[in-house]
Image: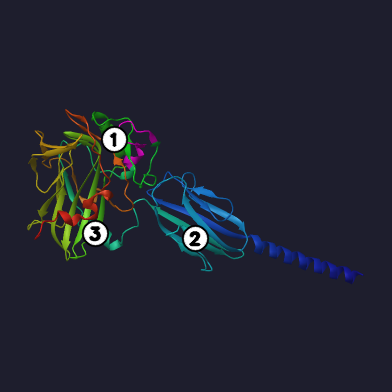
Amino acid sequence: MNLHRKLVAAVLVVAAAAASAQARAAGDATIVIRLITDPSPAGVSWTYRGAGSAFQLGTKALERTIAGLDAGTYTIAESLTSPGAAALTALSCVDPSHDSRTSAGTATASVAVGAGETVTCTFTHRALGPRPSAAAARLAAQLAPTLHLAAAEHYKPIAMQDFAARASLHTGTPPKGPIAQAHPTLFSLPVAIGASYLDLVGAEPSTASRYRSIEQQVEQSRPRPTVYWRTVRQPTTGRLAIEYWFLYLYNDFYDRHEADWEGVTLFLDDGVPLGLTYSQHQGRIWSAWPAAAADNHPVVYVAAGSHANYSLPGSYRVKVCWTLAIRHCTTTRQRDNARGDGVTLAAADYDLQPLGGTGYTGGWGSGTYLLGIGRTKDRVVDPRRRSDYSNPFAAVPAGA
């Protein structure tokens, strides 16, 4: 009898152990989803589905652990919670058994988890597109321009996210478009065709004083200026263009407006500098590479207020164009002061950031205010929507 009881007890122990092992195998797999955003924090959220209940990452959390899963394969799909640019640039999974698969193009991960296994998948979003190669970044840094500002200049090149953080996004046209986003970010700016604009909160283009205090806030939160860059190669010649773009908070000249995108582009032929194009009010001006250049860093003299770029210091006559019912142009009495007698920003003095991704389709700033005329229909267009971004070689003269 005792032997029978012992046998029954042993069977029960074995059965319990088997049941426990089966339970563990059926429900002890784990998937970890992580979100990386650049710039950070994103300020917007993404929704994830495919394992348990749908959840969001971005605004309040950057990681979610989904435990107690049965062994098997789960398709994790990411989608934008609110409208904005598709910004997924990388998707990877750390899988001990190496049988999970990812597709950044469809923003999905096919995650295979075994009993007791943990798989971690990371969704990486860069608002300004995929990270360029290390070689391209080194070249852009080696040839980055030296900016000579005028003593009368009150603004330095800033980061795009710092402008967006101090603006509200409006639909329609300035100045009375309804607010679409009170706190826009680079991830949430519209990329579909439609009228919209970023309006710096608490300031109007007709009055300059408020923008200086906003500039001070920006410089306190991010002391180093920001310069953007991009490289593009001309297929027919093999020449390389390195674009450098500067975003200023405010244009304080004969024409006043929020946001001012300016730039210079350096052209190389088989690694040898040929020349540069400088943005100046109504287009780009070509300047051959100086024969007696001290180093490979282009020199740029920035005009006070207008931020037009020149190859030599001086005072320059300016033609300004604007749009009311039709397009008007005139040479102004006010001259560009590009004497370079103020702050100098060498490459070591600012942060270089690549400029890519999908361009914002609206206007940077709440329109242009022309002294003596009033508000015009002109707007500041995102560089990624401009021809001198997509085809910088068009400004190079024939025979150069």
Alpha carbons under labels 2 and 1: distance apart: 41 Å
Part of the protein shown in magenta: 162-179
Query: Which numbered tag is attached to residue 190?
Result: none
Q: Which residue is mark 3?
A: 232
To which residue does mark 2 refer? 109
Q: Quadrant of the N terminus?
A: bottom right
- Secondary element under disc 1, as helix, strand or loop, is loop
- Is residue 72 positioned above or below 367 on the image? below
Rendered view: 157 above or below 13: above
Residue under numbered circle 1: 366
Image position of 397 with respect to 370: above or below:
below
Which three-letter amino acid code belongs to the residue tagged 2?
Ala
Q: Quadrant of the C terminus?
A: bottom left
Q: Is residue 267 above or below residue 179?
A: below
Numbered disc 3: secondary structure: strand
Q: Position of residue 255 (x, y in %)?
A: 18, 34
Percent position (x, y) of residue 388? 21, 52
Q: Residue at x 29, y 40 (%)?
A: 364
Precedes in sequence: disc 2 or disc 1: 2
